[in-house]
Structures are given as structure tokens and as C-alpha cells.
């Protein structure tokens, strides 16, 4: 079974927490893709429906937001969320980034938040985005900057890696930090034919009103990679790993919840 299919129930479980944590990234995508009222917007790799659902109010009742994801379980979760929120201007479908089921010149804006790192063929995916964009309209993609600048990831993983060997990844393997190097994703946009590809560093704070114990649970449930590593630990090792992780997480714990400095690259381009 696909790792994202297994993770889908946890992404749905934490969807509101995810929305809050990554709201600054959603805002940056909205700005760089120039999303506004009455537009047709496409959100690629929407997962359980965000940022599509967060952006739906920006296009308004006369606009339309389409969210696609290759994982049926994610799309089912997105549809449930849209129904619960009572949105009538959203539509969610199963589809992959490099085979978009839309005619050319359909959308005013295309966005993807933390999806590009996992595209099977990023150049083909960006070509598809440009195809479905209307002329002179924009796409904007958010990808993680380096692991070192994102303790949201490394606080727990570095503790676990003291006990479990991590094989080194191929340079272009699907991974959260595949496009961490400045310029790497911008070059993909250039190769795909985007006009005026641009990149900016978004420095923000991931804030969520949960305890360090709850954060441990969130990360170890949502991350297939962490769950696989934890499965290799003995019960005594797991107890010790959790103790050490919670100790490290204290640095990021505040009276109102967890707070992590974060860095993301926002890469955008225009269709000619």
C-alpha cells in the first residue's frame, strides 16, 4: 500500500493543526500566485484539502478551487472537509501533477504547498501547470529549505537516528528536502518553460497550540519514515528515544504551545 495512503487518516486527523501551522506558507503562495476574487485556482497535491480550503474564501463564491492529489484516501478526506465547512466553490479529484485532467488555459493561478518534492517528474509537472494556466498567469510552489533551518523536522528524527541507521538518499530522490538548495527548483521552472522564474526565502514561525507530548504523537503518526524507524526499536529503546525527544522539544515549547522557527522557499513563475 502506498505510504501516503497509510498516512492519510493521520493527515485528516491533524488537518486543522496543519492548516494553522502552515498558514504563513499558504499566505505567501496566495501572494506570489496573485490569487484574487472570482478566479479559477488549482491546488496540486492538496492532501486532505489544504491549502485549497484555506484559499477558497479568497476566490469567493463566484470563483472555483480545484484540488487534486494522487491518493484516493486524501481526496476522500478533502471532500469530507469541504462538506463539513459547507463550501460550494471547491472540487476535489484524484489526479497526478504530471497528468492534469484539465484543458489548456483553464486556471488563473496554480499552487502546490510541499508537493513538488514528491513529484515523480518535476519538469513534466511544471510543464503541465503551465499548460493549464491562462497566458500571463502565475504558479507558485512551496518547498522546505534545509533540514538545519527546520527543527520541526529534525528535533525528533535526529534522536531516532542515534538508534536506527538512515541510508543516504540519491540526490534527486523524493524527500522533504529534495529542493532545499536555493535555485534548484527555480531551474526546474526554467527548464519547463516558465517565464521570469523567481525564488524567495520565507522565514516564519510554525505555531500550534499543542504540548510537546502531542507534537511527538503528531510527527510520529504523520511521518511514514519516522513510523518505519520506530518499528525497529525495542520497547526500552522507544521509551528512551521519546524521553530524549521530549527533552529536546522543551526548547520549542511555550505557554501557548509549540513554536518552531522555519524556512521555506517560495518559487514562482509565469506562463508566457
Image: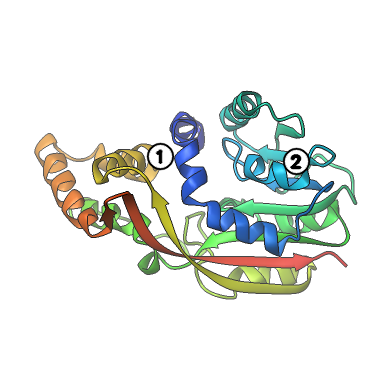
Q: Nearer the viewer, mark 2 or mark 1?
A: 2
Left of 115 or right of it: where is 4? left
Left of 267 or right of it: where is 33? right
Tell me, yes or no, if residue 117 can be seen here.
no
Residue 161: % across, % down: 24, 55
Q: Is 231 in front, or is 251?
A: 251
CA distance for labels 2 and 1: 26 Å
In the drawing, what numbered circle is on residue 222? 1
Tell me, yes or no, if residue 28 can be seen here.
yes
Please tell me whether residue 145 is drawn above or below residue 167 in the rendered image: below
Please tell me whether residue 234 is drawn above or below residue 154 in the rendered image: above
Q: Quadrant of residue 130?
A: bottom right
Secondary element under disc 1, as helix, strand or loop, is helix
| Sequence-wise first label, 2 or 1 | 2
Instruction: Give the labeled residue for mark 2.
Output: 65
Left of 161 or right of it: where is 65? right
Left of 196 or right of it: where is 259? left
Q: Is 25 in front, or is 117?
A: 25
Amino acid at each position: 500500500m502506498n505510504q501516503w495512503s497509510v498516512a492519510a487518516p493521520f493527515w485528516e486527523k491533524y488537518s486543522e493543526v496543519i492548516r494553522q501551522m502552515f498558514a504563513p506558507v499558504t499566505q505567501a503562495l496566495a501572494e506570489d500566485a496573485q490569487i484574487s476574487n472570482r478566479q479559477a485556482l488549482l491546488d496540486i497535491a492538496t492532501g486532505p484539502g489544504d491549502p485549497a480550503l484555506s484559499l477558497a474564501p479568497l476566490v469567493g463564491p463566484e470563483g472555483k478551487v480545484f484540488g487534486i492529489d494522487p491518493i484516493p484516501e486524501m481526496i476522500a478526506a478533502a471532500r469530507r472537509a469541504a462538506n463539513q465547512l459547507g463550501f460550494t466553490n471547491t472540487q476535489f479529484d484524484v489526479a497526478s501533477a504530471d497528468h492534469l485532467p484539465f484543458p489548456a488555459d483553464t486556471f488563473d493561478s496554480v499552487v502546490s504547498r510541499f508537493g513538488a518534492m514528491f513529484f515523480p517528474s518535476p519538469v513534466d509537472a511544471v510543464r503541465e501547470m503551465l499548460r493549464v494556466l491562462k497566458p500571463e498567469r502565475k504558479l507558485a510552489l512551496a518547498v522546505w529549505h534545509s533540514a538545519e533551518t527546520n527543527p520541526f523536522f529534525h528535533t525528533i528524527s535526529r534522536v531516532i537516528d542515534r538508534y536506527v541507521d538512515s541510508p543516504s538518499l540519491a540526490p534527486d530522490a523524493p524527500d522533504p528536502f529534495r529542493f532545499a538548495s536555493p535555485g534548484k527548483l527555480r531551474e526546474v521552472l526554467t527548464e519547463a518553460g516558465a517565464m521570469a522564474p523567481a525564488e524567495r526565502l520565507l522565514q516564519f514561525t510554525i505555531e500550534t497550540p499543542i504540548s510537546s507530548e502531542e507534537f511527538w504523537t503528531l510527527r510520529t503518526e504523520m511521518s511514514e519514515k519516522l513510523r518505519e524507524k520506530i518499528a525497529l526499536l525495542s520497547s526500552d529503546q522507544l521509551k528512551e528515544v521519546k524521553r530524549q525527544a521530549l527533552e529536546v522539544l522543551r526548547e520549542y515549547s511555550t505557554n501557548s504551545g509549540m513554536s518552531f522557527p522555519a524556512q521555506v522557499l517560495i518559487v514562482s513563475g509565469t506562463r508566457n
